[in-house]
Image (cartoon, rainbow, N blue to C red):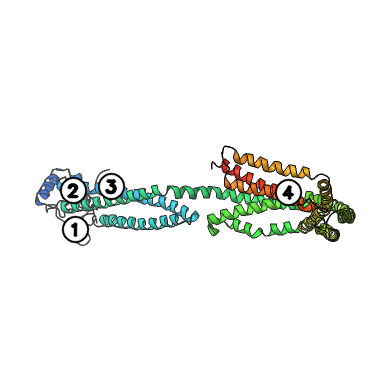
Amino acid sequence: MTATPPQPNSPSVPGAQGHPARDDSQPVRRVPCGSRHALRDTLTLVCALPLVAVLALPAAFAGGGTRRWFGGRAESQRAEAQAAKDDAAAAFYELDTAQRDLRISIETISAVDDSPAARRAITDFEALGRRIDEASHQYIQAVDAHDLDRDDLEASVAARARTELTQAKDELGRVKQELDRFEDGLGPLLGKAETQLARLAPAVERARQGLLAASNALDAVRGSGLKADDLAARLAALAPELTKLNQGAGQHGVPQTLERAERVAREAEAVRVEAERLPEKAAEIDHRLVSLRTRAQALTTRAGQVDPVLSELRRRFTAACWQDLQSVPDRAGENVRQAELKLKEAQAARDDQRWPDATALLSTVRALLNSTDESVSAAGDRLRRLNAVQKDPQQEIDRTRFAIRDAQRLAMTGRNTPDPRHARPLDDSVARLERAIGTLEGRHPDYWHFLTETAAVRQAVARVVAQIREERGGGH
């Protein structure tokens, strides 16, 4: 392209827009160089250029943002200041990026952890954020205070800019080091928070699946004709908890949502297990009803046999041997009647499928029958033992003496003299046995007193043996 000389009225020509046109013989105004020497050099250069280049010079010199063509101290200072500016910008960007990343970690911790350590970390991060703001403000002020692109930038201004930008960069670096140290200390808290977050989604899903499984099990039980109103009520009570789970941890908090999910999963699993066991429970209750009825009938028969036993005890032995058994027949009959009444109530509860009520009533029946069985058996057992000791009391005596001698040998093992803590109760047991043997003398011996005394002696001896073994086993 060939350059076209500017016309007199063209805006690109200095002197257009109402000003007198510049004569080509006059010097060029507003030369970018600030000194007389530079002006002379420039004029010399213009005179040496071809016409086309000369015509293009006014636009080049008049354009914005251009810098002088020559080096010197000012340009060197400008370059150093620009390098300091670039370094400070890199430090600012690095600090800003680190702060953003760390904020994500802090938000993770605050969403999960409400411990004192977590709250302290959040407070420390806020304080560190103020330090970052101060350092960033210092950097921004240094950047805004100096226009390094100015054509007339002085060397002293450039040097000052470099100093301030370097100081800002150093401060940004120091704050970045503090940020790094703070981040290193967050490791345990962040690990704990991330672990909880990793558990959250699976826990919520387990809770949902548990509720679904419990609902399906309940439907299957109802389909078989069994009622499960209590289980249905327990399952319905979990509906609000499911709603909160669906609303998410953002609304209710991660720890609370995690705890809620685990609780719902446990309760739903319990409902499912009980629903699946319900047919088995119904069959078990039916079996217990039949078994306890049979046992009540048998005890009624056995209770009727207590009176003959008591009659024989009265006839052959002293009152002390049978007086405590006088109420057995009446008490047994009353217990059996109460058991039969509870059995009817348990059958009604079973028919209504009130499973907890039926189970509780059957437990009451069993306790009544156990008590009756013990009292009825006591009368027959008393007669048997009295018959045996009346016939041969020596067997009971030998049994008790053997227990005493065995304890005495153990007390002397590894010793020349027994420990008084062991010897004294054993000596007392010997004397007590001799006194019990003495009660057998006379016309009407109290055999029951003799039997209870010998049993008490054996119990006392057994306690001494247990004490010795415990002490030796413990290294005493």
The answer to the question of whether label 1 and label 4 lie on touching residues, with beta carbons closer than 8 A, is no
Earlier residue among tags 3 and 4: 3
Outermost residue toward the front in this view = 442
Identity of the amino acid at label 1?
Gly
Q: Position of residue 61 (x, y in %)?
A: 20, 51
Q: Position of residue 329 (x, y in %)?
A: 86, 58
Categorize mark 3 by other alpha carbons within 10 Å: few (<14), some (14-19), many (20+): some
**Which quadrant does the C terminus fall into?**
top right
Mark 3 and mark 4: Cα distance apart in space: 102 Å
Q: CA distance from mark 2 to mark 3?
A: 15 Å
Q: Earlier in the sequence, mark 2 or mark 4?
A: 2
Q: Nearer the viewer, mark 2 or mark 3?
A: 3
Amino acid on which the number 3 mark rests in the picture: Asp
Towards the viewer: 287 or 129: 287
Mark 2 or mark 4, whichever is nearer to me: 4
Work out whether mark 1 precedes mark 2 in sequence or the reverse, and give the earlier one: 1
Label at residue 454: 4
Mark 4 crowdedness (10 Å alpha carbons): few <14, some 14-19, many ≥20: many
* Residues at marks 2 and 4 touching, judged by CB atoms closer than 8 Å: no
Specify the label residue 77 is tagged with.
2
In depth, the one of 405 and 163 nearer the eye is: 405
- Give the labeled residue for mark 1: 15
Please state which amino acid type lies under the numbered disc 2: Gln
Residue extending furthest toward the top:
414
Question: Which numbered dot is residue 462?
Answer: none
Classify mark 1: residues with Cα within 10 Å, few (<14), some (14-19) or many (20+).
some
Mark 4: which amino acid?
A: Thr
Q: Where residue 442 appears, x then y in whole percent?
A: 80, 52
> Which residue bears the numbered disc 3?
87
